[in-house]
Image (cartoon, helix red, strand yellow):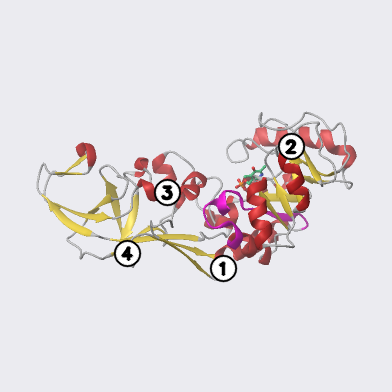
Amino acid sequence: MQRSLVTVDLGAIRDNARTLAGVLGRTELWAVVKADGYGHGAADAARAALEGGATTLCVATVGEALLLRAALPDARLLVLGPTPPDEVAQAREARLELTVPDERLPEGIPLHLKLDTGMGRWGSSEVDSVSGVVGLMTHFATADDDPGFAREQLRRFLEATDGYAGRFTRHAANSAAALTLPESRLDAARCGIALYGIDPLGVDASRFGLRPALRWESELAQVRRLGPGESTGYGRRFAATGETWLGIVPVGYADGFRRDMTGTEVLVDGARAPVVGTVSMDALAVRLPEPLERGAPVTLVGDGVTLEQHAAVADTIGYELACGIRAGAGRGERAVVGA
Ligand SMILES: *Cc1c(COP(=O)(O)O)cnc(C)c1O
């Protein structure tokens, strides 16, 4: 067993892509693999998504796209973020497609014009010039929690782009919209989180037929008994009221198990156990129902323990936790199965 082992199941990503492609029907599935594939490994995730039916890969930066280009010479690659002028030549050379948020259109490279319909971030308010444009897009601010506003954004987008239907690829939907707002699917849907089997609405991705691709495992490095009044960890945030058995797991916030995840549950020897006390940089403590053996397996994510559950405890979203899990650089291993 490893101190910290992250296993990515490419079969799950492939199956999730197939499921999404099935839901989308005539709409193309574009796989979003930015942020190193939401922490799953961009090139591996990209390959699996393409095998499952995705037709285009989307990343945030030219740098991410160049790394993918080296691994996937033939894939269609779209950069979603804004590209600084001094990166355009490289992007052209690598046969990327760019998203443009305003009226300055670089030349000699396929462009996707971004319309701001309510996200209040990047994007113009209308289509002015269309030289070099192959796609028209917008991004929803509330597809996961306010479908009413998402519908209003869609209405604005359709109104602004109506004259270009059929001529340009129109794309608006992210995972949440693709799964829950059928009318937003248009020509292509840009799905990220759902590919990895994480529910964009933070509940449970299995209701959409998706399964998590990431497992995170460790083991008990130590088992100890606390007497009444004794505490564990920094700040003495957990103190035993009676005799209490604790397991110490050698994973902490430096690995991506955040400090605000105290109170969440993990599996120890297959049974749920709460994380207690302060999560430190390299360790966390779990309360055990009985004195277990050192070396007992700990599942931090997997077998029904989901990032969505941890995110609810930490008052964040599965996206942020997935991107934050770190394995490598001497701190645990990353393995890939299902290739
Ligand atoms: C990240 C991103 C997506 C993917 O969103 P998910 O919720 O992960 O599906 C889609 N479109 C744009 C513009 C993005 O930046």
Q: Residue at x 76, y 34 (%)?
A: 115
Residue, disc 3: 309
User: What is the spatial separation of the Cα atoms under label 3 and label 4, in whole angstroms?
Assistant: 17 Å
How far across and down, in percent of the image, does residue 38 sit?
A: 55, 51
Q: Residues within 10 Å of mark 3 (few under 14, many from 20)?
A: many
Q: Earlier in the sequence, mark 1 or mark 2?
A: 1
Residue, disc 1: 11
Quadrant of the rendering where the C terminus is positioned: bottom right
Identified by mark 1, the residue type is: Gly
Taking 117 as reference, is 143 above or below it? below
Q: Earlier in the sequence, mark 2 or mark 4?
A: 2
Q: Residues within 10 Å of mark 1 (few under 14, many from 20)?
A: many
Identified by mark 3, the residue type is: Gln
SS of the residue under disc 2 = helix
Q: Residue at x 73, y 60 (%)?
A: 75
Residue, disc 4: 270
Query: Which mark is on residue 85?
Result: 2
Quarter of the image for residue 132 reads top right
Front of the two marks 1 and 4: 1
Magenta span covers which residues? 26-44
User: What is the spatial separation of the Cα atoms under label 3 and label 1, in whole angstroms?
Assistant: 23 Å
Taking 103 as reference, is 30 above or below it? below
